[in-house]
Amino acid sequence: MTHETCPEGTLNGLSEAIRSLAPTAALIRILPDKGTVTHLYDDEFFQLLTGRETELEVTRLVRRHFADVADWRRSHDFHVPTGNLYRSPEAFQNGYVPEDDQSFGMTRQRFVASADGGDR
């Protein structure tokens, strides 16, 4: 299912679906390490403590929405307020620890796609 056709096919739909599961989530970081590891952060750069079921459902929503534009063998960050998907910074880059540069690692060079269908 592509980001044009999924039920959460708009910025508001995807963001609302995520906020229904994690109301204060601002950034979703999906890492492909040994299965899938998902970290959720609030808008003050603090990691949210959620249950594994919530992490799995948020991951499923984001992956399904961006299935046609993202290589899920690599880490990605979804910024909930803007609906933008980015490649996660590598461990040696600013933004890998979301609070280190106050940007969540969201730079133009890492932009992959927006929830409303725009991609590079």
Image: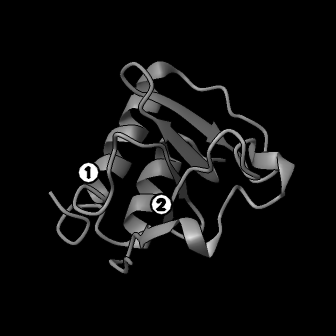
Answer left or right for 38 relative to 120: right
- Who's the residue at 40% across and 19% down the image? 34
- Mark 2 is on which residue type? Ser
Question: Based on the displayed image, in which of its 4 quarters is residue 2 positioned?
Answer: bottom left
Q: Is residue 88 above or below residue 48?
A: below
- Who's the residue at 78% across and 39% down the image? 46
Dividing the image into 4 quarters, which one contains the C terminus? bottom left
The one nearer the camera, 43 or 102, is 102
How did the renderer colour the structure? Answer: one colour
The one nearer the camera, 99 or 47, is 99
Question: Callout 2 environment at 10 Å: few (<14), some (14 to 19), or many (20+)?
Answer: many
Q: Secondary structure at mark 1?
A: helix
Question: Based on the displayed image, in which of its 4 quarters is residue 82 positioned?
Answer: bottom right
Residue 39 image point, x, y percent: 58, 34
The one nearer the camera, 103 or 28, is 103
Q: Secondary structure at mark 2?
A: helix
The one nearer the camera, 53 or 66, is 66
Q: Earlier in the sequence, mark 1 or mark 2?
A: 2
Answer left or right for 82 relative to 6: right
Marker disc for residue 111: none
Question: Callout 1 environment at 10 Å: few (<14), some (14 to 19), or many (20+)?
Answer: some
Answer left or right for 34 relative to 4: right
- Mark 1 is on which residue type? Arg
Residue 10 image point, x, y percent: 35, 72
The residue indicated by pointer 1 is: 64
- Who's the residue at 68% across and 57% down the image? 105
The residue indicated by pointer 2 is: 15
Residue 19 image point, x, y percent: 52, 51
Question: Based on the displayed image, in which of its 4 quarters is residue 48 positioned?
Answer: top right
